[in-house]
Image: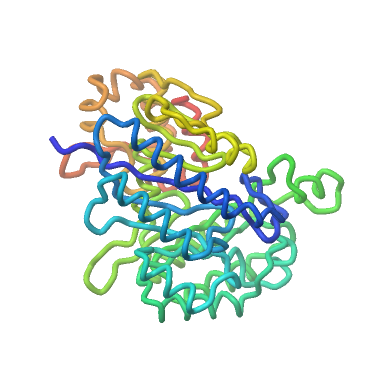
């Protein structure tokens, strides 16, 4: 039996400016640490690989952030060379890099593509200038158009665009315009996220003080439903609550293989400040501070897999917790859901034995449905339940 391939996530925490809605582990004004940080990242990649029993197979790599497009090409090259040396990359490994429009030019994008980056994810968020200002994004929509044009010219044939909906003051017609304008750019993949006001962010602070209205949940639901219908008309297939992809002319489906690893509860390693991983029955979380991360990795020593010198928290995942997490993540897959046969093979118990009462109730409420596939029955959200996912997931956690 072939070993399950791993995914690697590399967190690049640097930004020119921290956006008003962002609660990720990102930092502005620390670009002077990039060189030391990348060196530490390479040490962590090597350290974890060295503690594994065998050379691990890897099929996706994801540079996330922050703003990974702030990395000089020489460091992208050295990081990828280290991964290639330490791990066994499968043919056609998916390698994604997130970028902000306005932070990339033609030479940089050609350099990325030449180094093996084969998927680009651009944080568009909106085509409306007032909404971009509210979000404190540094680009305008003309920069998006230019970035897409340059990416295509550089050879990228797998391009994702992110959009955010449910903003304060956002109207349905401005959301429709953003979706239609980005559709005109013909990306291969869309990620559409509802705004959530997270504690500690400027937007949450402004809302708490009454300076911004609370997001309108009913309007956000209307935006979501309209976008799902519009993208379906345009030939994009929804495969996850927030994600849509299309097929290429040679019938390659552009779903994000890296994110599918998370949603299928398969193993992944997280490298960098604040990065998370799940492997060998444990969840790991790295120290948050980039400076502290660098210091820890400068004193690197052998650790038990999948830990590294930067690991700050470690949680052993028992079978019951793993079952719940598989249900929560797998049910996000709007087409596939959770396979009853795969669940039984993995855990030695059937879905009905473990969650029979919960499933029966949610099916009766028309929130879940059983669907026949070639490999047997799958349990998935009904279209109606895609807006009520958290209510469904709570039954299994």
Is residue 69 something that shows in the picture? Answer: yes
Residue 222 x %, y %: 58, 57
Name the side, left or right, on which 37 lies relative to 96. right
Image spot of residue 380 (x, y percent): 35, 40
**Residue 231 quadrant:** bottom left
Q: In the rendered image, is residue 118 in sight? A: no
Q: Quadrant of residue 329?
A: top left
Q: How many marks do you count on the picture?
A: 0
Q: Residue at x 52, y 48 (%)?
A: 11
**Left or right, 300 with reference to 18:** left
Q: Nearer the viewer, residue 304 or 191?
A: 304
List x then y, in percent, for residue 394: 50, 29
Q: How is the image coloured?
A: rainbow
Most extreme residue toward the left, as rendered?
1
Q: Quadrant of the N terminus?
A: top left
On the picture, is 219 further left or further right than 6? right
Which residue is depicted at the point 23% across and 51% down?
90
Name above or below for residue 148 compared with residue 9. below
Q: Nearer the viewer, residue 215 or 274?
A: 274
Query: In which quadrant of the rendered view does residue 47 lie?
Result: top left
Measured along the vertical axis of the image, is residue 183 above or below residue 278? below
Is residue 102 positioned above or below 323 on the image? below
Residue for point 57% across, 62% down: 70
Left or right? Give the position of 52 relative to 193. Answer: left
- Please report the residue visible at 58 percent of the width from the left and 38 percent of the height from the top: 293
């Amino acid at each position: 039996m072939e070993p399950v391939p791993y995914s690697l996530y590399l967190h690049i925490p640097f930004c020119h400016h921290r956006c008003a809605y962002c609660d990720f582990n990102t930092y502005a004004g620390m670009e002077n640490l990039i060189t030391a940080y990348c060196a530490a990242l390479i040490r962590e990649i090597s350290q974890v690989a060295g503690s594994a029993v065998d050379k691990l197979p890897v099929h996706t790599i994801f540079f996330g952030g922050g703003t990974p497009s702030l990395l000089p090409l020489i460091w992208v090259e050295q990081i990828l060379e280290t991964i290639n040396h330490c791990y066994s990359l499968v043919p056609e490994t998916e390698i994604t890099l997130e970028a902000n429009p306005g932070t990339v030019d033609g030479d940089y994008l050609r350099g990325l593509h030449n180094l093996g980056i084969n998927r680009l994810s651009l944080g568009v968020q909106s085509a409306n200038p007032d909404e971009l200002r509210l979000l404190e994004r540094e680009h305008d929509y003309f920069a998006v158009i230019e970035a897409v044009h340059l990416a295509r010219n550089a050879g990228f044939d797998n391009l994702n665009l992110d959009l955010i909906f449910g903003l304060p003051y956002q109207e349905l017609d401005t959301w429709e315009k953003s979706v239609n304008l980005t559709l005109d750019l013909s990306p291969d993949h869309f990620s559409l996220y509802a705004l959530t006001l997270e504690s500690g962010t400027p937007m949450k602070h402004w809302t708490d003080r009454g300076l911004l209205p609370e997001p309108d949940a009913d309007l956000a639901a209307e935006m979501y439903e309209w976008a799902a219908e519009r993208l379906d008309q345009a030939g994009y297939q929804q495969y996850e609550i927030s994600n849509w992809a299309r097929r290429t002319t040679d019938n390659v489906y552009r779903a994000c293989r890296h994110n599918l690893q998370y949603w299928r509860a398969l193993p992944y390693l997280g490298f960098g400040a604040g990065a998370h991983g799940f492997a060998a029955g444990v969840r790991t979380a790295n120290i948050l501070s980039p400076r502290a991360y660098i210091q820890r990795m400068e004193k690197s020593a052998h650790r038990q897999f999948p830990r590294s010198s930067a690991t700050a928290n470690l949680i052993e995942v028992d079978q019951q917790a793993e079952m719940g997490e598989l249900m929560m993540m797998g049910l996000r897959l709007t087409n596939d859901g959770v396979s009853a046969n795969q669940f039984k093979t993995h855990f030695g118990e059937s879905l009905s034995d473990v969650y029979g009462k919960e499933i029966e109730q949610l099916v009766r409420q028309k929130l879940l449905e059983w669907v026949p596939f070639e490999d047997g029955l799958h349990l998935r959200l009904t279209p109606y339940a895609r807006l009520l996912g958290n209510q469904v997931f709570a039954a299994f956690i």
